[in-house]
Image (spheres, helix red, strand yellow):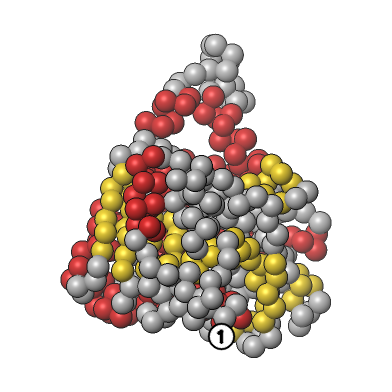
Amino acid sequence: MIQPQSVGVVEARTARFSAPLALKSGGTLDEYELVYETYGELNADRSNAVLVCHALSGSHHVAGHYADEPSNVGWWDNLIGPGKPLDTRRFFVIGVNNLGGCHGTTGPRSINPATGRHWGADFPFVTVEDWVTAQARLADMLGIERFAAVVGGSLGGMQAVSWSLQYPDRVANVVAIASAPKLSTQNIAFNEVARQAILSDPDFHGGHYYEHGVVPRNGLKLARMIGHITYLSDDSLAEKFGRSLRHGKALYSFDVEFEIESYLRYQGDKFAGFFDANTYLLTTKALDYFDPAFEHGGNLPAALARSRADFLVVSFTTDWRFSPSRSQELVYALLHNRRNVSYAEIDCAAGHDSFLLDDVHYHSVLRSYFDRIRT
């Protein structure tokens, strides 16, 4: 077997669409752009394409690095490349930045052609279903009629599931990792607290902070700190930081004293330096709204009856935000419809973020599944 390698230097591309996109919220985007990257080669009959859908803070930059930024490595680089579980010697892999994003795709930071100003809070609400529709248009542009697989973790897994429902004839396999058929009430609550941190920041200016030359940095920092706690397990936090005091003793202040406080503030500051607050608001709302069973009276098996794809569903034992029981709901509903489903529950201590890590058992499961996909 070839020693796993990086896909190397990659380049982001931009696809422009002039046909209006009707959104589930009732809004319309008359024109828009999607930024994407590709890895590997599309085969002669265009049957080896794999779409990777990103999670909340992800982007189109899934693997490899940029020529002028060698340290900017794709967020799933450990999974994608020659000799890796998603092997680019066999598959043509596509990563897309979703509508409403802040990495080049049309979103709140983009200029609204109707006003000549940043969209800001005027950018329409987008849903998982809207993202999938836009991705399908990109596939049309690339001449891809059917994906060998659509893959995603967390929110990306929801998009993969939605692909199988919106375009059942266009996807052969769905790989949904650390995901769920809908958010729990607790998850919606966490998202709301994070949004309120942003909305109550004095620099938010009703979502039109671009014109004021500021960003709601403190609110976005707090939102990320809240979210980051939910992505990790109690055991992983205890192992990394415990109750360690930075100065070896209590100083009785509200400054940073515990190592975990330092870590969370660092993560919040870093995130606030590159992510857009309006994108965070829109994306968490898309998470909240996703519920394919809603129009079927809450009946998930009925909602998934349209799907014709084979499925791999993966969960992690310490993921309390998207617990294994949520993945099992998806598995049971698919089995009810006599779909081919493989399920793996991986014993990993890292919590929800396990889907991003290089766990040997997790990657072995993915490698085994991808190896059996015919192209």
Residue at coordinates 78% horizontally, 48% vertically from top-left? 68
Q: Where is residue 209 in the image (x, y as percent from the top left)?
A: 74, 60
Locate residue 292 relative to residue 42 in the image: left or right. Answer: left
Q: Quadrant of residue 290?
A: bottom left
Asked which secondary structure carries label 1, the reply is: strand
Q: Is residue 266 visible?
A: yes
User: Which residue is drawn at the image coordinates 45% and 45% (left, top)?
Assistant: 1
Residue nearest the viewer, comparing 252 with 361: 361
Say above or below: 53 vs 308.
above
Residue type, label 1: Ala
Q: Residue 288, percent across and down?
A: 43, 64
Indicate whether 67 appears above or below 3: below
Foreground pick, 95 / 222: 95
In this view, which residue lies farthest toward the top? 248
- Badge 1 is on which residue? 22
Tell me: 164 left or right of 224. left
Where does residue 155 sit, x and y in percent of width and height? 45, 60
List x then y, in percent, for residue 341. 26, 63
Query: Residue at coordinates 75% horizontally, 50% vertically from top-left?
Result: 67
* Residue 197 appears anywhere in the view: no
Q: Which one is in front, 99 or 168?
A: 168
